[in-house]
Image (tube, grey):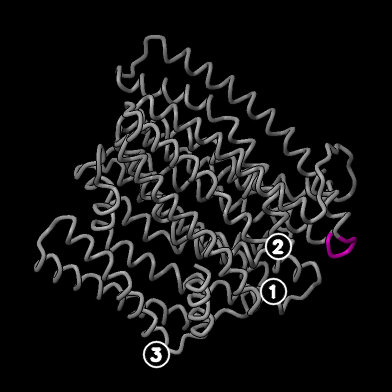
Amino acid sequence: MARNFQHIAVVAASTLGSRVLGLLRDILTLSLLGTTPAAAAFLFAFTVPNLFRRLLGEGALTSALVPVFSETLSREGKPAALRFANQALTRTAMALAVLIGLGLVVYGIAYLLLGAETRLGQDARERWRLGCILGVVLLPYMALICLAAAQGAVLNVLQRFAIHALSSVWLNIAMIATLLISGPLLGLGATSTAYLLAAGVLVGGLAQLFVPSMALRGEGWRWKWDTSGDERIGELRRLFLPAVAGAAILQINILVSRLLGFGLSDEALPALYLAARLVELPLGVFAIAVATVLFPSLSLHAASGDSQGMAKSFGQGLRVILAITVPAAVGLAMLAGPILRLLFEWGRFNATDVAVTRPVLIIFAVAMPSYAVSTLATRGFHAMKDTRTPVRVAAWSFFANLGVSLALIVPLGVIGLALANLISSALQAVMLMLCLRRDSARVLTDLRTPEFIKVVYSSLGLGLVCWLGQQFIFGWAGTGKIADIIVVCLLIPVGVVVYFILLWLSRFHERREVVEFAASMLRRR
C-alpha cells in the first residue's frame, strides 16, 4: 500500500496543477462571458462532449478496459496487452464516428426547429440556437478526449499515472491562451469570445490525444487499425455494455440538470457549472486520484482471487478519501462566499452572480463525500467484473434526481436543482455500499466505523475555526477584496493544521499515511 500512496501523490500533484489551471481558465471565462447568453450557450455545448468523455472515455470504457487489459498483461505479457489495446481503440473510434454523425443531425434539426415560431422568448431562442452552433463546433472534441482517456487508462495499468492526470493541463493552456487573445488583446464581445474559445478547445483536445500517444509509443505501442476479435474483445463487450448503461444514466442525470438550468435563466447554468467545478478541485485532486490508483490494484487482487488484499486496499482507500473529502466539504461550505468573491467577482461576473452561486456551491460541497464514496464503490464492483449492480443503483439515483428536480425547480429555482443533486448522490452512495455489503462482504471486512466518527469530529473543529475566523476578520477589516484575501489565505491553512492536529490526537488509523501523503504532495509540487 505504501507504493500506492506514492502513486496517489503523483496523480494528486499532477491533477492539482491541472485543476489550478482549470480554475484560472474558469476565472477568465466568467470574467469575459459573465452570465450572458453566450456563456450559457458555450457551457451547454461544452457539456455534451465532456459527458461523453465521462461516459465512454473515463466511464464505461475505462471500467471495462482496465480489468481485461490487466488480466491480459498479467497472463500473456505486454505485447498481447498492447494488441488488445489497439482492438479496443479501433472499436472506440468507430463508435465515436457514429455518435458525432448523430450529434450533427440532432443539432441541425434543433437549430431549424428553433428558427420557427415557438413559445420560447426571443432571448431564450437565441440562447438555444447559439448553443446548437457551438455544439456542432465542439462535437469533434468528443472523439479526441475519449480516445485520449482510453489511452490514459492503459497507461495507468502500466503504472504511468502522471500522463493521464496531466491531460487537462493541455486543454486548459489552450483555452487560457484563447481567452487572453480574445479579451485583453482583441477586446472581442461575449459571442465572438465564445466562438474563439470553442476553437481553443479543439486545439487543446489535439494536444490531449498527442501526449498519451507519445507516452504509449515509449512503452512499445504502435497504432494499428485492428477490427479483429477474440475472447478478450468478447469479455470487453460483456463488461462494457452494462457499464455504459450505468454511466449513461449518470451522464443523462447531469445533462438533465444542465438542461433544466439552461432553460431556467442565463444565471442558472453558470452557477451549476461553477459550483461543480469548485467541488471537482478537491474531489479530482484527492478522491478520484485514490480511486484511479487503486482500481488497477483492486482488479489485480480480484483477478488473482486475493480477497484479503482487496478488502485491505478498498478499506484503506475509503478511509483516506473520507479523511480528505469530509473536511474539504466543510471548509468549502464555510468559505463559499469569500472564495467566490475573491476568485470570480471580476468583469461581467458581478456580486449578484456570486449571490446566486453561493448557496448552490454550499449544497454541492455537502454532496462531495457522496461523490467520492460512489466513485470508489463503483470501482470496487468493476474490479470484480460486476458492472450490473452500479447500473441498477445509477437508475434509482437518476429517477430520484429527476423527481426532486421537477418538484423543486419551480419553488426554489437553481437551488432546487442543487438539492436534487445532493439527495440523489447521497442515495447512490448509500445504495452502492449496501450492495457491496450484501454481495461482497469480504470487501468491507476492513472497514472501521469509529474511524469515520473521528473524521467528522476533526472536520467540525475545522469548520468552527473557519466560522469564528470569518467573524473576527470581517469585523476587523470590513468587507471587500482585502478581507476576502485574508480569509481565504489565512483560514484555509489554519483550518487544515487544526484538522490534522485533531485527526492525529484522535488516533485515526491512517493518520500517518494521510500526513505522508500530504508531505509527498508538497514535495512533488
As helix, strand or loop, the secondary structure at mark 3 comes to helix
Instruction: Say which amino acid is labelled 3.
Output: Leu
Q: Residue at image x 58%, y 50%?
A: 167
As helix, strand or loop, the secondary structure at mark 1 comes to helix
Count of marks placed on residues? 3
How far from the left and from the top, in percent, is residue 48? 52, 35
The reply to whether residue 429 is in sight is yes
Which quarter of the picture shows residue 379? bottom right
Q: Which of the two labelled residues, at mark 3 and mark 1, occupies the earlier sequence position?
A: 1
Residue with the mark numbered 3: 505
Query: What number is the disc on residue 310?
Result: 1
Front residue of this view, candidates 159 and 381: 159
Front residue of this view, candidates 239 and 438: 239
As helix, strand or loop, the secondary structure at mark 2 comes to helix
Residues under numbered marks 2 and 3 in contact, where contact means CB atoms less than 8 Å apart: no
How far from the left and from the top, in percent, is residue 192? 38, 24
> Which portion, as a residue range, is magenta?
73-77
Instruction: Say which amino acid is labelled 2.
Output: Ala
Instruction: Say which amino acid is labelled 1.
Output: Met
Q: Residue at image x 70%, y 68%?
A: 298
How far from the left and from the top, in percent, is residue 13? 52, 64
Q: Residue at image x 71%, y 58%?
A: 386
Q: CA distance from mark 3 to mark 1?
A: 29 Å
Magenta span: chief secondary structure = helix
Q: Looking at the image, is mark 2 or mark 3 nearer the viewer?
A: 3
Q: Which of the two labelled residues, at mark 2 and mark 1, occupies the earlier sequence position?
A: 1
Q: CA distance from mark 2 to mark 1?
A: 9 Å
Q: CA distance from mark 2 to mark 3?
A: 35 Å
Residue with the mark numbered 2: 383
